[in-house]
Structures are given as C-alpha cells and as structure tokens.
Amino acid sequence: MKVTFWGVRGSIPTPGPETVRVGGNTSCVEVCTPDDDLIILDAGTGIRPLGLSLQARYKDRVIGHIFLSHTHWDHIQGLPFFSPARRRGNRFTILGEKRVDERLDRVLAGQYMDTYLPFSLREMDADILVKEVRDGETVVLGEHTLVTAQRMDHPGGCFSYRIRWHDLAVVYATDLRHPAGALDERLIEFSRGADLLIHDAHFTPEEIQRFPDWGHSSWGQAIAVAEAADVKRLALFHYNPTATDEVLEALEKKLQTKHPYIFLSREGLTVHLGAADDSL
C-alpha cells in the first residue's frame, strides 16, 4: 500500500521560503492499494497538485473516492481546483458526514456559489457522487479494501478513517481533541496495531494548554496514542501555520533519537507499506 502526502498544513495555506521543505498546502493524503483502489483523504489545497499528478498518471480514466474528515475550510478549499473533476469519463465519490443538520452535498455546493467562484459544482464534467457516511460505518471498496469512519471530538464533528487492505492498515486522525489530562480511548482502539498512524500535531505540548478548545492535538499526544495503540509508524500532521521548516525539522530530529518510528509528513513524501522495511 502506498501513502503520499500532498498537503500537511492546518488552518490556512502557508506558502513561502520558511515552509517550502515541509510544505504549505492544507490537508490532502493519497492512498493507493495494490488493487489500484484510489483513496483521497481530505480536499485541502494539496488536492490541486494531486489532481495534476493523477492526470499525468492516468491518461484514460480516473476513478477514486474522496473521504472528508469534515468540511472546515482547510479540508475542502482545494476541491474546486481538482482538475480530474473537470474531465469527462472520470468518476469520484465524495464521502463524509452530514454537517450541522445540513446535507453534505449542499454544504459542498455552497462553496461553488458565484459569490466565491465563477463556476458551479454542476459544471464539473466528471461523474461525481456525494454520499453521507455514518459513525462506525465501513465502506467496501473493490475486492479487499475497507474504510471505516470513527467520529472524533472536534467543533462541529470530525471523522477519523481506518483504511484496511488485507493485513495492512492506515489510520488518518486529524483535527481531534483529546480529553483534558487523558487520551481518547476510542482512537487508541481504532488505531490498534496500525502500520501507519497519521495524527494531528497542530500544537506543542505547551500550546495545547493555552488553546484547549480549538479541537486539535499536540505532537506529545500523538506519540502517546501511537505507543498505547502499538502502531508501527507515526506521521505527524496538520501543522500550525506558524511552524516553520526549521522548527519542525528540529522537532523531528529530537523525537527520532528516542522514537525512530516517528517522522514528519511532508508534501511529496511517499510511504510504502507492506515492503520488507516499510520504506519511505
């Protein structure tokens, strides 16, 4: 199974010289199974370069599933600029939770209003289906791929996803808040034994004390979940807009002296799971 990071930033895109190595695009992760099931996790601005890559790789037709953790702006703002959605013959299913008593398709269509964009969702030439998923539901893709949704604590709600292909598992857990002074036991069980856990690391352990209601986690909490769930690899994700390459790379170097299985998610980084060494 192949996992590629296309957007790793939280809240707002942060282009510029201080973020060029780790990346400034907002949340988007591509998962490809050996059966060629294409799974896209979130549609932040990182989905734009992913779309260009997909068009170059798939000359005839692209079929994929886009799983949204939630519809806060940094997780959907790239969707109108996802170029494969403009090509006739392509097919995408967008899955997520009903938001604040509003149907998911209406929430997504709302960002295509002429107040914000000069085109509408209906003008996309690809075949696009929007499907709502319930907490705890497992979606079956192809012959061997299962994607399970788990609601987490975040303002307005948020889904984490566990993707399974045979014995391999990836857990995507962004934009979540742990209970004060504890860890979310549901996430620990949900992540149990995963080959890769992608976990929100928006705050430092010190910052999380100052912003307890923002609905995010610290890198310290991410490590604690990974250890409690006995995961093989931990990717820190959804960085604070103020976190520079220098700060993040220094953190990675420090953490890896004690926890060699931890790494920074970076734009363009691909992780191969199921190889002899689960190589990067």
Image (tube, rainbow, N blue to C red):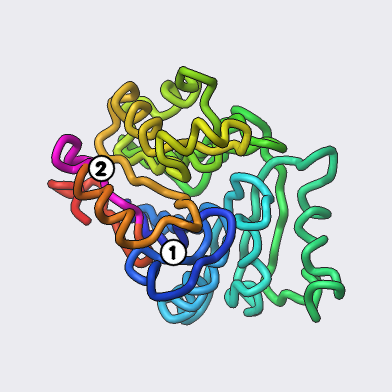
Q: Earlier in the sequence, mark 1 or mark 2?
A: 1
Magenta segment: 255-265
Residue 34 visible: no
Task: Classify 10 Å Cα crowding around label 1: few (below 14), some (14-19), many (20 and above).
Answer: many
Element type at mark 1: strand
Q: Position of residue 216 (x, y in %)?
A: 54, 38
Left or right: residue 62 versus residue 76 is left
Above or below 12: residue 118? below
Q: Position of residue 164 (x, y in %)?
A: 41, 39
**Residue 262 within the magenta-colored segment of the rendering:** yes
Q: Which mark is residue 262?
A: 2
Left or right: residue 126 versus residue 46 is right
Closest to the camera, between mark 1 and mark 2, is 2
Q: Which mark is residue 175?
A: none
Residue bearing the label numbered 1: 6
Residue for point 40% across, 67% down: 19
The amino acid type, in three-letter code, at marker 1 is Trp
Task: Classify 10 Å Cα crowding around label 2: few (below 14), some (14-19), many (20 and above).
Answer: many
Above or below 201: residue 122? below
Element type at mark 2: strand
Residue for point 38% across, 34% down: 222
Verify CB contact (< 8 Å) between mark 1 and mark 2.
Answer: no
Q: Nearer the viewer, residue 246 or 71?
A: 246
Q: Position of residue 260 (x, y in %)?
A: 17, 41
Q: Position of residue 35 (x, y in %)?
A: 38, 54
Which image quarter: residue 94? bottom right
Left or right: residue 21 versus residue 41 is left
